[in-house]
Amino acid sequence: MGREAGGPGTAALYLVDGVALLRPDEQVFTAMLDGWRTQQLARNLAFTTIEKRLATVRAFTGHADAFPWAWGSQMLDEWLGDLRSVRGLRRSTIRNYSSTVAAFCDYLTDPAYQWVEQCERRFGTHPVQVVHEWNTAVHAQEAEGDPARRAFTLNELQALFDYADEQVARARAAGRKGWLSLFRDATLLKTAYGYGLRRNETAMLDVVDFGANPHAREFGDVGLCRVRFGKANKGSPPKPRTVLTVWPWTVEIVQQWTQEIRPLMAEAGSPALWPSERGERLTVNAINRRLTEYRRALDLGPGLDFHSLRRSYVTHLIEDGWDPLFVQQQVGHEHASTTSIYTCVSSDFRTRTLRQALDATMLAAVRPERTAG
């Protein structure tokens, strides 16, 4: 379906014909970015997604030292090569960057938006698509995560939680004011694991997001956790879900935090479950820093990050015999294949499963056949 002339993102909305520009290169480029922002808003893309894309285009422009109407494929090759060899970015990140540049070039070269005409008149040249199959990596597999990323073993998880609790006990015994923040962070890590949450889902929790599950009254008012900022599909708002409480110990830690410890914090009036000393809500970066600090103190490998808590949740539920469909719904995966990627069952679990299957087979083989009565 064609777009009407003068629609969102059209060059004519940002540049007036016949008007001389003081800094034509910079002003036209700024107008292009403004137009692309408007076009993406019209497509209902998230503000954060749009800003990240604009930052990527600016980064490429700075590296190429040229504006879009002078871009060439070789400039992209050099930029992507620099990102890989010098900055050490991951393949998936580099692919996202190249996809962003490709989308921007598609926008500029689409006749409906009139940027080609504008550039021809003002600069005697025009933008072209610089991203092609032959100069970008092929997306050959469904899961491209770092193979070093994995779930915590039960022993590693216990060590992490014990260490977090030790920091609280030491700070409190020494009369340090920071013990409240340490208690918050220890509870946050346990809660993230206890409900299989992502970083942003954890950071955006409010106190009121916990509630009773009428089908599991033994959990009281912490029978479920309402995740309001779940990972969104492209162009969609955050996807909410409700995670049911499965382990009694999560009830104890959440109730102790909300009823006894959290009210002692200066920002206790904030709706956030995890208030910050410097603001209303703890940031994702602060959460990452705390886990990294503890991981290094315990000499655990870099393959264990915050998302490993979510991997552990999936893995341990599967190992404990929970129905895979239930686990999939708990973590909010649309497809079972995604949940399977998160599952990092231990060798002990696989050995037990194999042994049970072999024992059952042998038992069936040696069982005497029933005789007719």
Image: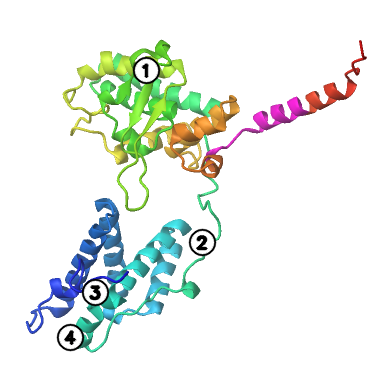
Q: Residues within 10 Å of mark 3 (few under 14, many from 20)?
A: many
Which of disc 3 and disc 4 is earlier in sequence?
3
What residue appears at the point 22 percent right and 31 percent down from the top-left corner? 276
Q: Residue 151 location in percent, x, y?
A: 52, 36
Which of disc 1 and disc 4 is earlier in sequence?
4
Mark 4 vs mark 1, foreground winner is: 4
- The disc placed on residue 122 is 4
Q: Amino acid at mark 3?
A: Tyr
Q: Nearer the viewer, residue 279 or 16?
A: 16
Q: In the image, 85: left or right of 272?
A: right
**Residue holding disc 2:** 139
Q: Amino acid at mark 4?
A: Arg
Mark 2 vs mark 1, foreground winner is: 2
Q: Main secondary structure of the magenta part?
A: helix
**Residue holding disc 1:** 253
Which of disc 1 and disc 2 is earlier in sequence?
2
Which span of residues is magenta-colored? 342-357
**Label 2 – label 3 distance at C-alpha:** 29 Å
Q: Nearer the viewer, residue 251 or 302?
A: 251
**Label 2 – label 4 distance at C-alpha:** 38 Å
Answer above or below: position of 199 versus 189.
Answer: below
Q: Residue 343 location in percent, x, y?
A: 56, 37
Helix, strand or loop at label 2? It is loop
**Label 4 – label 3 distance at C-alpha:** 16 Å
Q: Quadrant of the N terminus?
A: bottom left
Q: Are marks 2 and 3 in contact (CB under 8 Å)?
A: no
Q: Amino acid at mark 1?
A: Ile
Helix, strand or loop at label 3? It is helix
Helix, strand or loop at label 4? It is helix
Answer above or below: position of 335 versus 224.
Answer: below
- The disc placed on residue 113 is 3
Q: In the image, 296: left or right of 339?
A: left
